[in-house]
Amino acid sequence: MLELINAIVLGASLGIIVTVLTAQADISWNARRWAIAGILFWTVLVVAGAAAGHFTPGTPGIVIQPPAIFAAAAVALSIAWFFSAQFRRAMLSIPLQALVGLNVLRVLGVFFVAGYFMHKLAAPFGPVAGLGDTITGLVAIPLAISIARGSFSKSSVAWWNAFGALDLFTALTLGALSQDGVPFRVFFGEPGLTALTQLPSVIVPTILVPIYLLVHLTVANRLGEAPARQAAYATALLSSKSGLPAA
């Protein structure tokens, strides 16, 4: 029953994330369709691979560890961010409250904590990753509200953003060091992290985590460029009132 609930929740979460990012970004309808198609294509590959057992150690045939799938997604998004000005502008055009608000979904990290207590995920990954995500999601609620009201503290958002990103990197590190079948495994607690190589949980490290890291990167850049944007807006407003062209 828990697996069914987990599948529904993760599927709905992915749908919400994709919908918000593509709908809020200042892009053309054609670009929006390509973005949705790209995410859908990656999701189909991940789901098909997991369904065939290609991510689970010990399965006959080709086995690809989830950390490698995450790395491929992270590299693709990094290339898009650093080498495509259009992609970068699209991400930066998303309202800050939407970027922060998406992290509210991370309260679902309680499923990882529940998985630990139900002996489906081993420590330290289960409780650490689950609690970190839950805290990030809970704090995102008042932050998103304050941003929408225009009364937020930039330093508070920056600290929250750093914590949320660190939580993901910590979870990735613990996951890689706890993964079955890797030569650098450090944590051997039972039952391991086999659940993260199977549906529906495999969606988290291979799809959701790369997207959330991109969101954190975007938030950091939005905070860094906020003064410049405000200055440009003030200049444009002053020019419109004076009748002079903006610089």
Image (cartoon, rainbow, N blue to C red):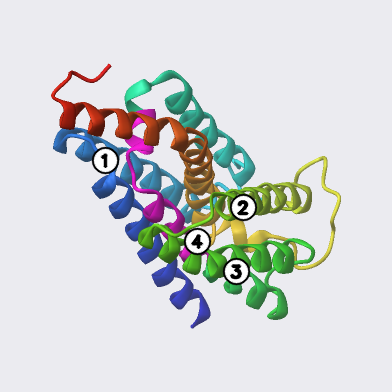
Dot 3 or dot 2, earlier in sequence: 2
Amino acid type, mark 1: Ala
Residue beneath the point at 59% across and 62% down: 136
> Residue 38, relative to residue 145: is it above or below?
above
Examine the structure image and report whether residue 84 is included in the region drawn in magenta.
no
Dot 4 or dot 2, earlier in sequence: 2
Cα distance in 3D space between marks 3 and 2: 27 Å
Residue beneath the point at 60% across and 69% down: 134
Is 77 displayed left or right of 195 in the figure? left
Cα distance in 3D space between marks 1 and 4: 21 Å
Task: State the mark number for residue 56.
Answer: 2
Dot 4 or dot 3, earlier in sequence: 3
Neighbourhood count class around disc 3 (C-alpha, 10 Å): few under 14, some 14–19, many 20 upward:
many
Cα distance in 3D space between marks 3 and 1: 30 Å
Q: Where residue 179 appears, x then y in whole percent?
A: 73, 51
Cα distance in 3D space between marks 4 and 2: 10 Å
Eye-nearest disc, 1 or 4: 1
Is 181 displayed left or right of 106 in the figure? right
Eye-nearest disc, 3 or 1: 3
Which residue is disc 1 drawn over?
Answer: 37
Which residue is disc 3 drawn over?
Answer: 134
Eye-nearest disc, 3 or 2: 3
> Residue 44, relative to residue 242: is it above or below?
below
Q: Where residue 23 appears, x then y in whole percent?
A: 24, 49
Dot 2 or dot 1, earlier in sequence: 1
Eye-nearest disc, 4 or 3: 3
From which residue to which does the magenta span run? 88-106
